[in-house]
Image (cartoon, helix red, strand yellow):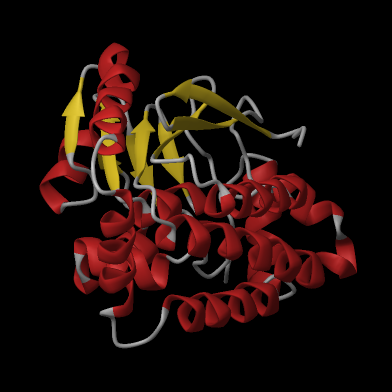
Amino acid sequence: MDFETIRVDDLGDGVKELVLTRPPANALSIQMAFELRKAASNFVADKTLRALVLRGEGKVFFGGGDLVEFQSGGDQTPANLHEMTIDYHGAISRLSKMNAPVVGAITGTAGGAGLSLVASLDLVIAGESARFVSGYTASGLTIDGSSSFFLARTIGLRRATEMALTNRMLSAQEALDWGLVNSVVADDQVLDEARTLAAKLASGPTNAFGGVKRLLVAGAASSLEEAMDRESFAISNQASHPEAVEGIDAFINKRKPNFG
């Protein structure tokens, strides 16, 4: 199918590339969440897919949720956020459990939902300019996109809590040291490295890879879907709270929020 906010390219030999195409920030909208879930469903059903590269178009990998769209929803914002997170979480669930490994090619910023996505990917190649930030609480929101599941498991509870509460921004090297990414290369080498890795994985035992992925996800105390379901209700409920109203408005208008 044709998409408006993403693109799927066939690189051949069982490798495909999922590209986020909402510049300049590749921000997550209701439409993008729907399209990501649809694309992920297509990948699950695609018996020819053996590896997937995921990247953003432009200077930003994935800047998080589209707060302008959130704010424009008015009284419908909580319902809109719930709908969006259901689709976005559906995409992450499918990508994390499908047979084909997913390789992230990260340049620029991965913020909010983008950080969550990075944490959920199977393998991640980051450029030297890459930056990683949670950002949710800076806008008065709670985390979503599987952060309470994958981020905490990937970098540890203490560090995940620090990122979520202080909105500390990690450099590419810090992300490597913390275990958020697998390797850091020059920015102009990221895509080649990710594609090379995906091609290598595509020659491997795809079904076994899928089994490994599902076993690792199932090894947590609570299931991914349970964690993301809690996140959906938390962020949609928080969206109507004065903290979120103030935080989103401050972000859009480039001022410091007043949560007092």
The count of marks equals 0
Relative to the observer, which residue lies in front, 11 or 203?
Answer: 203
Q: Is residue 28 visible?
A: yes
Q: Is residue 136 visible?
A: no
**Horizontal and vertical percent for residue 62?**
51, 38
**Left or right for 241, reference 75:** left
Vertically, is 30 above or below 213?
Answer: above
**Horizontal and vertical percent for residue 50?**
39, 41
Vertically, is 77 above or below 120?
Answer: below
Relative to the observer, which residue lies in front, 249 or 234?
Answer: 234
The residue sitting at 52% across, 74% down in the picture is: 228
**Left or right for 13, reference 124:** right
The residue sitting at 35% across, 20% down in the picture is: 191
The residue sitting at 87% across, 62% down in the picture is: 74
**Horizontal and vertical percent for residue 45?**
58, 53
Quadrant for the N terminus, please: top right
Vertically, is 114 above or below 6?
Answer: below
Quadrant for the C terminus, please: bottom right
**Left or right for 23, reference 104:** right
Q: From this viewpoint, which residue is outermost toward the left?
A: 177
**Residue 84 picture quarter:** bottom right
The residue sitting at 34% across, 65% down in the picture is: 150
Relative to the observer, which residue lies in front, 93 or 236?
Answer: 93
Q: From this viewpoint, which residue is outermost toward the bottom?
A: 221
Relative to the observer, which residue lies in front, 130 or 32?
Answer: 32
**Left or right for 184, reference 258:** left
